[in-house]
Image (spheres, rainbow, N blue to C red):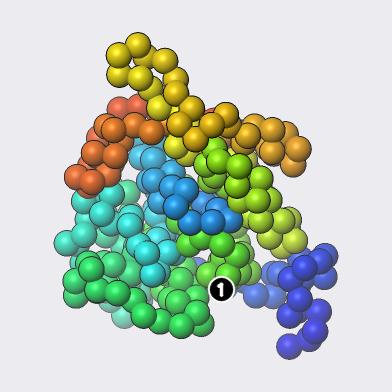
């Protein structure tokens, strides 16, 4: 491997990125692939991924969700699919389907118990995510959403290099760390020539149950300012919503009646 291929901090890496791309299963026809990322953990990437999948499916699109957070998978729980087990054939592994036919693949679906820890080193984790792309029979999809682990480590690097992404969505929160969170993800994507679709702010505010006013629990939002500085769109703000939290806990995210992500939906449809 040449030295030019092993660096990921400049234009040379971007030029050679295609040499790392893996082909998906020959039975797949996937039109658009979008990764949901963040520079740190705990900001709600899995929630935004799940909500986006639900919104797109309701519009009639065929949607799949790849849970790339191998050591902290939560996608099956949100969709009430924890007890589902994928089928397989000599051609590959089939994802499970939710009540509304959203296709899912997660390491939790392959474990004997949902609370069984995945104690693997980075290369094995990254290799598993790559297999979710090469070995899983997703079939015909309009959108494949990839729920990423936090940070800029092995898995994000593997996904960015191995899977032909149409773009990423950056998830953040309103605290002062927002600039650092967004810029880390932004800079990694830029260095690898991955299109950035925009920013979604989670836990943006709360609604007072008595007067209906918005309460900035974590202070005034700085996401719009950072997005403007970087020249990327602000795609939506998701509040602290007890109904939303309850649906996630019950595995009933597909029953969500509110659409906080219309901007996100529009950006994906414009791809």
Residue 240: name its quadrant. Answer: top left
- Closer to us: 247 or 2: 247
User: Which residue position is annotated with label 1?
Assistant: 154
Residue 227 in view here: yes
Extreme residue in the left direction:
83
Residue 151: name its quadrant. Answer: bottom right
SS at mark 1 in the image? helix
Residue 261 in view here: no
Q: Considering only vertical position in the picture, is 143 above or below 66?
A: above
- Mark 1 Cα shell of 10 Å, populated few (<14), some (14-19), many (≥20): some
Residue 13: name its quadrant. Answer: bottom right
Left or right, 270 with respect to 142, comes to: right
Where does residue 222 sit, x and y in percent of width and height? Answer: 63, 34
Q: Quadrant of the C terminus?
A: top right
Where does residue 4 sit, x and y in percent of width and height? Answer: 81, 79
Q: Residue at x 54, y 38 (%)?
A: 174
Extreme residue in the top direction:
211
Q: Residue at x 40, y 27 (%)?
A: 206
Q: Residue at x 30, y 28 (%)?
A: 257
Left or right, 5 with respect to 179, comes to: right
Where does residue 35 sit, x and y in percent of width and height? Answer: 53, 54
Where does residue 132 sit, x and y in percent of width and height? Answer: 42, 69
- Image label count: 1
Left or right, 12 with respect to 23, comes to: right
Q: Considering only vertical position in the picture, is 7 above or below 185?
A: below
Q: Quadrant of the N terminus?
A: bottom right
Extreme residue in the bottom direction:
1
- Closer to us: 66 or 59: 66
Q: Residue at x 51, y 60 (%)?
A: 150
Q: Considering only vertical position in the picture, is 106 above or below 250?
A: below
């Amino acid at each position: 491997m040449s030295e030019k291929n092993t660096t990921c901090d400049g234009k040379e890496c971007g030029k050679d990125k295609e040499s790392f791309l893996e082909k998906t299963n020959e039975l797949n026809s996937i039109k658009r692939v979008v990764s949901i990322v963040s520079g740190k953990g705990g900001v709600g990437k899995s929630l935004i991924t799940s909500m986006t999948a639900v919104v797109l499916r309701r519009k009639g699109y065929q949607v799949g969700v790849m849970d790339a957070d191998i050591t902290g998978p939560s996608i099956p729980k949100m969709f009430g699919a924890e007890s589902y087990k994928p089928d397989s054939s000599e051609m590959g592994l089939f994802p499970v389907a939710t009540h509304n036919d959203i296709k899912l693949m997660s390491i939790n679906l392959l474990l004997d118990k949902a609370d069984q820890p995945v104690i693997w080193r980075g290369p094995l984790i990254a290799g598993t995510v790559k297999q979710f792309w090469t070995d899983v029979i997703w079939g015909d999809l309009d959108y494949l959403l990839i729920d990423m682990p936090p940070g800029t480590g092995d898995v994000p690097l593997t996904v960015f290099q191995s899977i032909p992404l149409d773009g990423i969505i950056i998830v953040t929160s309103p605290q002062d760390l927002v600039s650092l969170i967004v810029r880390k993800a932004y800079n990694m994507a830029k260095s690898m020539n991955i299109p950035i679709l925009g920013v979604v702010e989670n836990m943006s505010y709360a609604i007072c149950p008595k007067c209906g006013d918005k309460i900035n629990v974590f202070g005034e939002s700085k996401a719009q300012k950072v997005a403007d500085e970087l020249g990327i769109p602000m795609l939506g703000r998701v509040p602290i919503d007890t109904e939303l939290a309850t649906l996630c806990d019950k595995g009933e995210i597909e029953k969500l009646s509110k659409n906080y992500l219309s901007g996100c939906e529009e950006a994906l449809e414009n791809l």
